[in-house]
């Protein structure tokens, strides 16, 4: 399957990349903007609160009236109170630091998974008519592919939205469930485009149709993960600034069409009887 996808990718590089870019570029830029805005908002409050506490304590010390020297008993009692307060403060600080470290990562994971998977789903849907007709020897391009998506936009949107939400929730559970769900929905865009199904029905049909083809589906999603890591590494190599999300988007736009073409070819293989009836039907 990968060899066929690579051959198609080489022979029809520009139509594939241009078709997928229509969905992938906005999704990547929206994801980068949403994550940057969300993380800055989450971090700003914590810093402000942390700075206010010392100022308040200093103000209280300045306003406090002078007291007589403490006795030995009161000093011992005060030491015990301070120890208890420090232990409680340490526990609260640890819990607060844990929440401040986990919450931004959970937020970023959910946003990236939802937006990037929505973009991938749309790009995958547009690749379906393009790849299938290129395999039939027809010269088609991005406008033809997106015209087909427009004719099935409601079904594609309903299926993609439900799938993206499920995968994003799965990604929060230590990533692996999200990956398995994404792989199980590998055929859903093509089913929504070609078989008149949408939403839950398309997702369930994708799961059932993958029997005997899980290895190919997981292999294509492994490629998507590898390409995502490469995009992140390329962006990290750039100096901080707007160039980073642009570089990451460029790497994904160039590389993602390869596994997406492979997933369309996998649909053709897994659903060959339905596909053959479809192309042989009159009109």
Image (tube, rainbow, N blue to C red):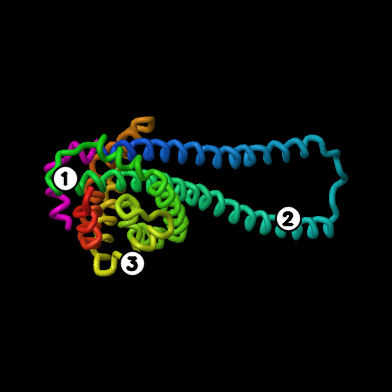
- List the residue tagged with mark 1: 134
**Residue 35, percent from left and from top:** 46, 41
**Residue 163, percent from left and from top:** 41, 54
Identify the mark at residue 208; answer none if there is no mark: 3
Classify residue 129 as left or right of residue 118: left
* Crowd class of label 2 (few under 14; some 14 to 19; many from 20; radius 10 Å): few
**Residue 214, percent from left and from top:** 27, 65
The reply to whether residue 233 is visible in this rendering is: no
Q: Are marks 1 and 3 in contact (CB under 8 Å)?
A: no
The reply to whether residue 96 is visible in this rendering is: yes
Q: Are marks 1 and 2 in contact (CB under 8 Å)?
A: no
The residue lying furthest to the top in this view is: 242
Upstream in sequence: badge 2 or badge 3: 2
- CA distance for labels 1 and 3: 26 Å
The residue lying furthest to the bottom in this view is: 212
- CA distance for labels 1 and 2: 75 Å
- List the residue tagged with mark 2: 82
Q: Quadrant of the N terminus?
A: bottom left
């Amino acid at each position: 399957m990968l060899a066929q996808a690579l051959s198609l990718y080489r022979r029809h590089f520009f139509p594939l990349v241009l078709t997928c870019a229509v969905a992938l570029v906005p999704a990547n830029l929206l994801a980068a903007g949403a994550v940057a805005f969300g993380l800055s908002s989450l971090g700003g409050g914590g810093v402000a609160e942390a700075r206010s506490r010392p100022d308040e304590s200093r103000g209280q010390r300045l306003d406090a009236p002078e007291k007589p020297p403490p006795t030995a008993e009161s000093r011992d009692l005060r030491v015990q109170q301070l120890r208890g307060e420090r232990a409680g403060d340490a526990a609260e600080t640890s819990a607060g630091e844990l929440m401040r470290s986990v919450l931004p990562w959970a937020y970023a994971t959910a946003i990236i998974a939802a937006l990037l998977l929505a973009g991938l789903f749309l790009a995958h849907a547009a690749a379906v008519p393009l790849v299938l007709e290129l395999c039939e020897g027809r010269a088609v391009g991005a406008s033809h592919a997106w015209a087909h998506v427009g004719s099935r936009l409601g079904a594609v949107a309903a299926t993609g939205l439900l799938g993206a939400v499920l995968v994003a929730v799965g990604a929060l559970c230590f990533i692996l469930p999200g990956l398995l769900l994404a792989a199980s929905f590998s055929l859903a865009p093509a089913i929504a485009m070609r078989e008149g199904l949408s939403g839950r029905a398309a997702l369930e049909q994708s799961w059932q149709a993958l029997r005997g083809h899980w290895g190919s589906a997981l292999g294509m999603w492994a490629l998507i993960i590898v390409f995502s890591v490469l995009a992140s590494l390329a962006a990290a190599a750039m100096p901080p600034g707007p160039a980073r999300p642009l570089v990451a988007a460029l790497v994904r736009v160039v590389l993602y069409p390869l596994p997406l073409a492979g997933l369309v070819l996998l649909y053709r293989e897994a659903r060959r009887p339905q596909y053959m009836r479809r192309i042989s039907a009159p009109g």
